[in-house]
Amino acid sequence: MKNFFEKLLWSSRYLTLLAVWSCIAGMAMLFVLSAIDMSKLLLEFIDVYFLGHEVEHFHTIVVSHVITAVDDFLLAMVLLIFALGVYELFISKLDFAREKDTAGSILQIKSLDDLKDRLGKVILMILIVSFFKNVLTVKFDDPLNILYMGGGIALVALASYLGHKGSGH
């Protein structure tokens, strides 16, 4: 009975495949949706700059869409790193990636702390990108807004520095 129970417990790790495949599906959807949005933006760019149609604040619209796409791509990468990390930690090492040396060091996860560290760095980048997207809408009609903006930039720089310093560089 003990052996059966232990085998059942050990086999329960295969339930993590639900998380792996869900993350892969989410990653694929984000990549495709972001690529479609960027294609639409390219068509709108051609329409405005080459066909002469006027759109008010078009530059700000383009920058906002590009930042959103970068944000979505980064989130898709978080899902990929998480999926591969969970697979390597709970199911099996990805021998194909190690043989071909195509994965690089970012996708080779050795422990939960390693996975957490890699995810944390990408999530920090998502937060930085989101911060700068929100900066586009700040009105500088009040000196306090300028002060808040400077403080926000200083905090982003500090977070980036501490993230870099924490990785041993």
Image (cartoon, grey):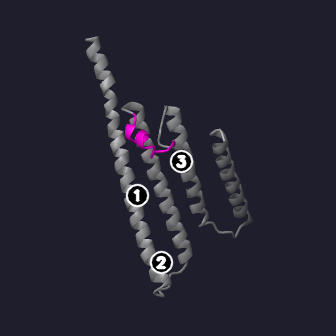
Asked if the magenta segment contains residue 85, the reply would be no
Looking at marks 2 and 3 on the same chain, the residue that comes earlier in the sequence is marked by: 2
Name the residue that disc number 3 marks.
123
Residue positioned 68% across, 47% down in the render: 161
Looking at marks 1 and 2 on the same chain, the residue that comes earlier in the sequence is marked by: 1
Looking at marks 1 and 3 on the same chain, the residue that comes earlier in the sequence is marked by: 1
Distance of label 2 from label 3 (alpha carbons): 30 Å
- What percent of the width, then of the height, locates residue 32? 37, 60
Residue positioned 52% across, 72% down in the render: 61
* Neighbour tally class for label 3: few under 14, some 14-19, many 20 plus, Cα within 10 Å: some
Q: Secondary structure at mark 3?
A: helix
Which corner quadrant holds the C terminus?
top right
Residue positioned 34% across, 29% down in the render: 13
Name the residue that disc number 2 marks.
45
Instruction: Identify residue type, mark 1.
Output: Phe
Q: Which residues are magenta?
A: 93-105
Q: Secondary structure at mark 1?
A: helix
Name the residue that disc number 1 marks.
31
Of marks 1 and 3, the one in the foreground = 1
Quick check: 3 above or below 15?
Answer: above
* Neighbour tally class for label 2: few under 14, some 14-19, many 20 plus, Cα within 10 Å: some
